[in-house]
Amino acid sequence: MARNLIYRYFLLILIVFLCIITTGLTIIFFTYDSLKNTIFQNIERNTGLIADDFDNKFLGIRSSNDFFTNKMLELYSKNLRMDIYIYDANHEEVLSNSFNDDFFERADWKFSSEIQKEISPSKNLSYMEKFEVNIEPYEIYIGCVMPYTKVSVHTDKAVNVFLAVALLSIIFSTIFYWVYNFFKFKSVLRIEKCFVGENISIPIPKRVTPEYEPLVEGVKAIQERINYNDRHMVEFISNISHELKSPLTVIKGFLGAIIDGTIESEHRYTYLVKILNEAERMHQIIKNMLNV
């Protein structure tokens, strides 16, 4: 029975763990996907602003390399927390700026008219978009690169919460399982107070788990045996009482008749012999009772 309880316990923990894993991975995936989409929407909105600023402020001061490079691009880079690259139509780098000291090498961009989005645990989160501008060569490519670790910081929080929930769930399941089985075991063994001559009352669940079936069968057998003994004890006492009353009634009647003179003196001997026989009969009954 104890082995079955342990097996069922580990099965319960396995089911709980699998449910938590499935739920946790689903939550982490949606958190990651939602974060990625939010980042891309923010980048897409800001790259349009970068293109406008590049178009307006870069005209006539490209060689000086002061205002847009040092101010605006730095501001956008820090705001997006991404390295920003600007390429011309010939795929030559025009400007770049990093939001920290770790500057990425030039990515292998796919220059096309379509938006490029990439994200992978082994790569950096990247985004590139093509814009038309009013300066030669009339178009630029704005690319942004973010290290994957910046994204994983947020997902790591979800993982930590998931691990905490998993641990608390396993602890709660363990406590609930053993407390439930403890009280269930006590309910099977609980026996109400009873007296001789009453049928003993043992509350036994109608349906129990397999490990409790031998115990329940044993309790039922004990209950039947006790009730059987009680019934026979009552019958035995009733029979003994009846058998003892008969000779006592005869003895009492004859002695009373002799004392009050109802029985004449010449017949007293005959009745005294009957009294003696009844006394012997009562003695034999008591002897048999003691033997039983």
Image: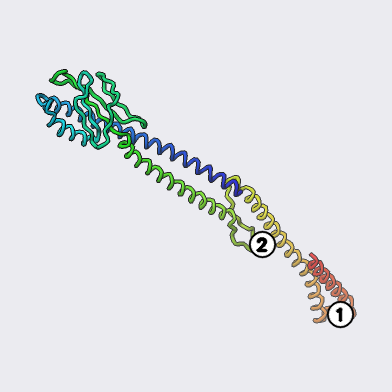
Secondary element type, mark 1: loop
Residue 138 in picture, x, y percent from top left: 16, 18
Residue 70 in picture, x, y percent from top left: 15, 33
Please tell me in which quadrant of the rendered image residue 108 appears: top left
Q: Is residue 244 left or right of residue 72?
A: right
Taking the view exactly as shown, the residue that stands out farthest to the left is 60
Residue 135 in picture, x, y percent from top left: 13, 20
Q: Amino acid at mark 1?
A: Glu
Screen quadrant of the C terminus? bottom right
- Local crowd at mark 2 within 10 Å, few (<14), some, or many (≥20)? some
**Label for residue 231?**
none
The residue at the point 39 percent across, 42 percent down is 162
**Label for residue 264?**
1
Examine the rendered structure and indicate whether residue 206 appears above or below residue 253: above
How did the renderer colour the structure?
rainbow
- Local crowd at mark 1 within 10 Å, few (<14), some, or many (≥20)? few
Q: Amino acid at mark 2?
A: Gly
Q: Is residue 105 left or right of residue 245?
A: left
Examine the rendered structure and indicate whether residue 289 appears above or below residue 108: below
Secondary element type, mark 2: loop
Q: Which residue is mark 2?
A: 197
In the depicted view, which residue is nearer to us: 215 or 242?
215
